Image (cartoon, rainbow, N blue to C red):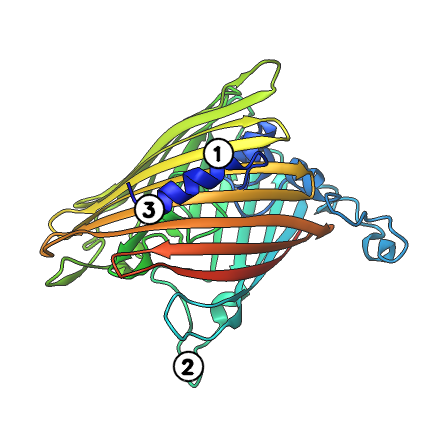
């Protein structure tokens, strides 16, 4: 057992107030689609998503010094409910794990969202990430991850709440759970002493998807997509480098989640799995959570990603969350990375521990301090402090 995991367990069981970024669905019992236009979560918030967090803050919106900022702020929907707007702005102050690296401040996300609902059954939505326009110093090259898009758009059609939702456009396929931190273990892999990503932030593909949520406790999804984004991801066997996906075959995805609740909705759970496959490339995820409403959440995720004959990664993540009160949430996360390159003599392994907090200081303003420990095959461990400013709507 890696020594970092032992340290994590020691902290976990010696401190009564837990740590971790809570998964809000585990704390509230809501499905992703209850709060987001996207059935799998993330992006533009719907009515419930906006109302749930518009007044969550340490400093209340009616405080004399700031109440002028929120006058007329009654909804994120306009034009008799036909138009919706939203945004996520994130700025990070961080230092890489490389020895001697400088601490830097940089934009992570500057995404604007909009949706148009001409009739009840149809939603046309889109997003644009201004941060993807950022260029490298002394260069005209944009700073983007392989597969990252500057924007996305789709049309959703649901004739009735008990019927499936049909979606088509350029959007993120429903794979695993939608975490708000792209550095989390499920969709990454370790390559020697560094961490790389399979699914970039703002990764999207052209395609179509159907979602069924006619039962309160069930989500079923299936989709067919292109592979332009994933084809940009380069994987190395130890002797040669290839694209994760080659050719013109479609990427097929399936996902299923059950959301049972117990003891008069005091205990919230979800359990699910997803599969993404395109010829010799596949990503299979299993994920689960249990939460005590408005108090504690525990999530786990195990994801296996494989390019046959090139590389295979098996990643595990566990996260415990404690909500002190609505505007302050503590979290701790353990991550385990195991990547085997087909032509390499041994696997690349790594372990990480993450401790931090989400603090909603003002309405729509979150500050997230975070401490990370990274343990690889190299001698010793690396650690760093990060702090993120998140402004959302």
Residue displayed at 47% across by 66% down: 132
Residue displayed at 66% across by 47% down: 84
Where is the N terminus found, in terms of image quarters?
A: top left
Residue 214, compared with residue 316, is above or below; it is above
Residue displayed at 53% across by 70% down: 106
Name which quarter of the figure residue 123 lies in. Answer: top right
Left or right, 357 with respect to 194, comes to right
Q: How many marks?
A: 3
Mark 1 and mark 3 lie on one chain; the one further toward the N terminus is 3
Marks 1 and 3 sit apart, C-alpha to C-alpha, by: 16 Å
Mark 3: few/some/many CA within 10 Å (<14, 14-19, 20+): few
Q: Position of residue 393 (x, y in %)?
A: 67, 51
Tell me if label 1 and label 3 are in contact, CB under 8 Å: no
Residue displayed at 54% across by 43% down: 331
Q: Mark 2 — residue? A: 140
Tell me if label 3 and label 2 are in contact, CB under 8 Å: no
User: Is label 1 in a helix, a strand or a loop?
Assistant: helix
User: Is label 2 in a helix, a strand or a loop?
Assistant: loop
Mark 2 and mark 1 lie on one chain; the one further toward the N terminus is 1
Q: Mark 1 — residue? A: 13
Q: Residue furthest bottom?
A: 138
Residue 47, compared with residue 249, is above or below; it is above
Left or right, 371 with respect to 84, comes to left
Q: Position of residue 293 (x, y in %)?
A: 61, 26
Marks 3 and 2 sit apart, C-alpha to C-alpha, by: 44 Å
Left or right, 146 with respect to 102, comes to left
Mark 3 and mark 2 lie on one chain; the one further toward the N terminus is 3
Name which quarter of the figure residue 74 lies in. Answer: top right
Q: Mark 3 — residue? A: 3
The front one of 216 and 158 is: 216
Mark 1: few/some/many CA within 10 Å (<14, 14-19, 20+): few
């Amino acid at each position: 057992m890696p020594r970092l995991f032992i340290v994590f367990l020691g902290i976990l069981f010696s401190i009564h107030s837990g740590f971790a970024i809570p998964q809000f669905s585990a704390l509230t019992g809501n499905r992703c689609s209850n709060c987001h236009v996207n059935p799998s979560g993330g992006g533009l918030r719907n009515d419930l998503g906006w109302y749930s967090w518009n007044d969550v803050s340490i400093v209340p919106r009616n405080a004399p010094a700031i109440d002028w900022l929120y006058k007329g702020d009654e909804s994120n929907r306009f034009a008799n409910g036909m138009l919706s707007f939203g945004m996520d702005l994130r700025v990070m102050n961080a230092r890489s794990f490389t020895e001697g690296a400088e601490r830097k401040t940089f934009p992570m996300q500057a995404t604007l969202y909009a949706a148009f609902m001409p009739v009840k059954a149809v939603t046309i939505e889109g997003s644009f990430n201004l941060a993807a326009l950022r260029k490298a110093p002394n260069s005209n090259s944009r700073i983007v991850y392989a597969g990252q898009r500057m924007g996305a758009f789709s049309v959703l059609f649901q004739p009735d709440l008990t019927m499936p939702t049909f979606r088509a456009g350029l959007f993120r396929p429903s794979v695993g759970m939608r975490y708000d931190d792209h550095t989390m273990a499920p969709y990454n892999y370790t390559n020697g002493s560094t961490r790389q990503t399979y699914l970039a932030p703002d990764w999207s593909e052209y395609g179509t998807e159907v979602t069924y949520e006619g039962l309160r406790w069930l989500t079923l999804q299936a989709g067919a997509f292109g592979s332009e984004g994933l084809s940009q991801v380069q994987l190395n066997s130890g002797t040669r480098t290839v694209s994760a996906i080659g050719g013109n075959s479609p990427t097929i995805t399936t996902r299923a989640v059950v959301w049972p609740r117990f003891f008069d909705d005091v205990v919230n759970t979800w359990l699910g799995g997803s599969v993404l496959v395109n010829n010799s490339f596949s990503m299979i995820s299993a994920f689960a959570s249990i939460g005590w409403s408005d108090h504690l959440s525990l999530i786990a995720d195990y994801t296996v990603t494989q390019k046959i004959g090139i590389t295979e990664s098996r990643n595990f993540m566990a996260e415990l969350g404690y909500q002190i009160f609505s505007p302050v949430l503590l979290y701790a996360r353990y991550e385990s990375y195991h990547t085997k390159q087909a032509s390499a003599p041994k696997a690349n392994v790594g372990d990480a521990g993450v401790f931090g907090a989400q603090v909603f200081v003002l309405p729509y303003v979150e500050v997230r301090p975070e401490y990370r420990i990274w343990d690889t095959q190299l001698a010793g461990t690396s650690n760093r402090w990060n702090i993120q400013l998140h402004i959302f709507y």
